[in-house]
Image (cartoon, helix red, strand yellow):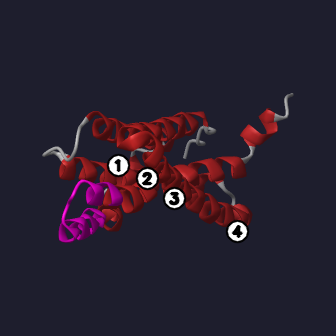
Amino acid sequence: MSAQQPLLRSKFFWVAVLYFAEGFPLGIFYEIFPVYFRQQGVDLRDIGALSLLGLAWTLKFLWAPAVDRFRHHRRWMAAADLGMGAVMIAFAASAGLPHWVWAAIAVFAVLSATNDIAIDGYTIELLRRDEMGRGNGLRIGFYRAGMITSGLVLMASDLFGWTGAFFCAAAILAACAGACLLAPAQAAR
């Protein structure tokens, strides 16, 4: 047995990976999009309106029962990550601010909120009650690490331009999708 196998079987490893995947898109929304808009000459008032699209996280309780009912949390997570990656590729492939930018960010926010629902549901089923405290510490730490990583992607925009930064974000989201599919399967209810 390789040293990697016990790590991949560790529930806490998967909690860390999945909460990184949950924090990274939120960082994109709150750190990258406003700076990108500002550099594209968008009015501060309009950038402030971006927070209205953040209502997706507030309203996710409306579709959370559907995500939980149809379960397959790993598939929901992977699909959400791939969808957000597609939005990043669309941004990378377009110049300036295309007419569809607000709709694309709304889709991104809904996908990110759906990802949150699926990750939380998966984690609740993954951890035993006596593991919740340790799991919670990892959740917070790696969620923040995901957000910080989005800040590094923002810094990369200085080196590689926005196209490179958006492709980098898409690659990270694709890696998150792959990780979600590798996570241990859920036990049947």
Q: Would residue 149 be seen by someone viewing this image from the given angle?
A: yes
> Counting other residues with Cα less than 10 Å from the Cα at mark 3, is it few (<14), some (14-19), or many (20 or more)?
many
Residue at label 4?
Answer: 133
First in residue order: circle 1 vs circle 2 = 2
Q: Residue type at mark 1: give it.
A: Leu
Q: Residue furthest top?
A: 1
Image quadrant of residue 38? bottom left
**Dot 3 amino acid type:** Met
Q: Nearer the viewer, residue 13 or 39?
A: 39
- Which element type, helix, strand or loop, lies under badge 3? helix
**Residue appearing at x 39%, y 42% in the figure:** 161
- Near mark 1 (Cα within 10 A), the count class, few <14, some 14-19 or many ≥20, is many
Tell me which label, 2 or 3, sits earlier in the chain: 2
The spot of residue 118 in percent (x, y) is 46, 51
Residue receiving disc 3: 147
Residue type at mark 2: give it. Answer: Pro
| Residue pointed to by mark 1 | 111
Query: Mark 2 falls on what kind of element?
Result: helix
**Looking at the image, which residue is at 13% across and 46% down?**
99
Q: Which residue is mark 2?
A: 25
Range shown magenta: 35-55
Decide if residue 148 is on the left or right side of residue 117.
right
